[in-house]
Image (spheres, helix red, strand yellow):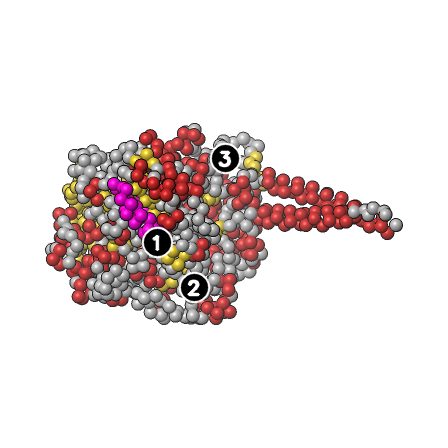
Amino acid sequence: MKKRDSSPKAARIATASLSVLLAVAIGTTCGATSYRSLICSTIGGTMYKTIDKANAEPLQASTDNGMSLDEWKKAADQLVEDVTSEGIVLLKNQNQTLPLAKGSKVTLFGRSSVDLVLGGTGAGNINTDYVVDLKSAMEDDGRFTINSTICNFYKTYDGKDGYVRSNGGYMGAKPEDIYTAEVPVSEYTDKVKQSYIDYNDAAIVVFSRVGGEASDMPTGAFGDGEKYLALQPAEEALLKEIKNSGAFDKIIAVINTSNAMELSWVDQEEYGIDACLWIGGVGQSGSRAVAKVLDGEVNPSGRLSDTYAADSFSSPAMQNFGDFTFTNANEINSSIGEANNGTKYVVYREGIYVGYRYYETRYSDGVTDPAGTNALSSAGAFVGDTWNYDNEVCYPFGYGLSYGAEDGLPFAQEVVSSKMSDDGLEMQVKVTNNGTAAGKNVVELYAQQPYTCGGIEKSAVQLVGFDKTDILEPGQSETVTITVPKKEFSSYDYRTDKTYVLDAGDYHFAIGNSAHDALNNILAAQGKTVEDGMDAEGDAEKVYLWNNAKKTLLNVSYSGDEVTNRFDDASLEYYGEDTDYLTRSDWSTFPESYTDLTATADMMAAIDAEGSYEPGSSDTSAIITGQDNQMTLAKMYGVPFDDTETWDKLLNQLTTEEMTRIVTGSALSTIPSIAYPAMFMKDGPQGNQLRTYVEDGTSATGFCGEVLRACSFNRDLMYEVGTAMGEDWYRTETVGAYTPAVNIHRTPYAGRNFEYYSEDGFLSGELATQEVEGLQNHGVICYIKHFALNDQETNRQGICTFSNEQAIREIYLKAFEKPFTEGKVKGSMGAFNRIGCTWAGAHSGLQKDVVRTEWGSTAILDTDIAINTTMQSVVGGLEGGNTMWATSGSVFYGYVVDKVPKDAKLLANMREACHVILYNVANSNGINGLSATAHVVSVTPYWEKLAYALIAVLSIADAVAAFFVVKNSKRKETL
């Protein structure tokens, strides 16, 4: 029998396989070239080279700090530890349980004890290569002896499928995929339990929660529990196991989360907790600070940047948090298209009463006028039948204890002098350490404005100033001076005067160890005592009283222009609906969820960003493009923004295609006509983790979380953080930094609270300004984010956010204002959400009226990641004042490039956007190494060359295989 020849079949299979591979290679390469800058920033590669035949001296807008890379890594690592040291908050220390004696034998409980939360997921991810685990930190230098048996048990415990502590990544997570992942006590082996007795000086129990981008924390059922910020059954069982074992001399709880957990259990007898530390997200080396606080080498000096409520659902904002859909969602989609993402909304019915402004104001009214205000009614009572502050709040904003005194308050603060001038208040406070341990102390200054029932809503107390002492030895004193501009204790009247107002009447300024403590001092100055319902006596000596004889309007902005209403369209009243905002004149107005909202025709028109744009003239001849003026970007270094003549020379060189590429491509691509090099912009608030050091290819520093940084209440330290970040961005050759993030902790369940500082806009803005200045002194362009009202992740892409102008200005824009005006931030990253019905990136009231007119800023206004050409309309966004779209892809470019030469208004907006972008880049480290005579030439990155080489090889192989198929076919025909 003749053997069958299999070569034709093999040739056909080879040809088909190679053809498929070739098609995949070509398709992948084409797609990759659209994201060339993103790929280069991730795996390396050069997109341009500079040529300077004149050999002119290159510019150097910034340099490194002179340290070797190894020296710098150690210094940055130490800074992470130092910040953590100052941010850790001592919440409880019964009978001076802490500090522990050095050498104590300790058992670490909780699965998170071997896997601390470092920050958050998504933009908060940290490379674990440098991370110091808690056990190692505590064993270092013989500090403690740690129970290895239980640590190893936690590390090797597998549990059920998916049983890993998680809250997703950049794309978020579903509730059913989120786990606290605490090991059930029933799984503890005899060997584990028998190990207690040898390490029984203290049981340290770690409780962790982690937030992430694109999804909020579960308020209902999730992977292994319910109500994520509550103590879970497995954790309750663990605490009871520890106490009932009778093995441990001391039980210490460590709260490892940036979101405000429910902590009433800390004082419940059944769990026997002696001390409690809040440590936040500790970054790569903060665990060393935790160990040093536990043994007393570091005296805790942190103060809470949020209110910790007994019930995490109890704030008025929580009643309108989450998923709300317009009743006529189908009509919206059919009218303006699903791509607008315009069917979701949220209503900020709480107005200004966010965080401590709610809890403290209601407490105050419960003391001064309980019957007239219904402050002690059942409305909004979550713990008990009627509202009671002590039941509702576990730990107030600004609270924190220290070592050195039985009550945890070793420092005495005395108002030395107070003076009010036309500029504002100056107060001097003497701080004395009366305790037995050296440490730092925070001075917190709060104000109370005069309030009239039915008038402008006002918080009973608000933070207006703070400072932190140096380390004070026992008996040592330091006097700090706090200055407060009058605007900080004014209110925004959006109804009548439509500007900031200093009402006539008495203003009280008080220091205190928390917002609550300061408020009690104010109430004492007003003659109130515990007999009137106060929960503790106040100290009137810590209060300064100032009377404003006549109402004053503060209607001149930072730039000298008028301050007036810019956000009328953000409120439902603009569309004829009633919001029924919470008012302190009647606390029975505690809000319910705003459901059954129907979008009107006007709302739908505003939601449709693309449809609301009216094109300009088709005659664009008045705008010069493509001119050769021999101008380069480097020649613009130091040229003022308003030097129109010089800037016109550069801008006139740009073609419409080049303008579009700059604006719709995050200014990442090379523009040879003006010698503009390719640049990189990267996250984030916890470090430049997606880039590596140029010198050795290792990851940059993983900083501790923003909440932990905020709890330091230390401006100088935040400047150091900013400077350190600037050093990392410089050493990784990254021009833009998507940090700091300053949105407000409107609720405790927001997924990205870990990368925002606080529930308080003043504190956030003060600290952010320092970080911005530190970063930008290294030539980095800071993109402060997310601008604005991006306070939840649920439905963030397109959600209509309704609020009133007072709340917008006093709560949400407050955190951005000082970084823009005094910090001179060079950029902002926008938000996915809408303000009212208008996408934030197209809201002219926000971007033109506030940023450009009132704040006088020339910052780049960028989008959040550009993913939806309809919702994030380029034409609508440019008309509304946006200047750049955050994408390295070509989708937005392709969507709009053909429209630009045919629309004079669009072209003018595009040109002005380029003016803003190029001005900021020309005054950043983006021009490092360029000279005025240098030219930039595009080159193909190494990976793209490899891809083309692979395509060439596959093409040849495919052709050869095809040749044999044809040859074998002809041979068969011959036979």
Image coordinates for residue 833, horizontal then vertical, percent: 42, 58
Cα gap from disc 2 to disc 3, whole angstroms = 44 Å
Residue that numbered label 1 is attached to? 232
Helix, strand or loop under label 1: loop
Which of the two labelled residues, at mark 1 and mark 3, occupies the earlier sequence position?
Answer: 1
Horizontal side of 225 relative to 387 (left or right) equals right
Q: Residue 502 colored magenta?
A: no
Tell me the magenta residue range. Answer: 234-259
Badge 1 local density, few (<14 within 10 Å), some, or many (20+)? some
Residue that numbered label 2 is attached to? 344
Q: Mark 1–mark 3 contact, CB under 8 Å?
A: no
- Res 446 seen here: yes
Which is more toward the observer, 78 or 968? 968
Helix, strand or loop under label 2: loop
Image coordinates for residue 376, horizontal then vertical, percent: 20, 63
Q: Which mark is residue 697?
A: 3
Helix, strand or loop under label 3: loop
Q: Residue 257 colored magenta?
A: yes
Amino acid type at circle 3 is Gly
Which residue shows up at 66% across the image and 42% down it? Answer: 950
Which residue shows up at 24% across the image and 35% down it? Answer: 471
Badge 2 local density, few (<14 within 10 Å), some, or many (20+)? many
Q: Which mark is residue 518?
A: none
Which of the two labelled residues, at mark 2 and mark 3, occupies the earlier sequence position?
Answer: 2
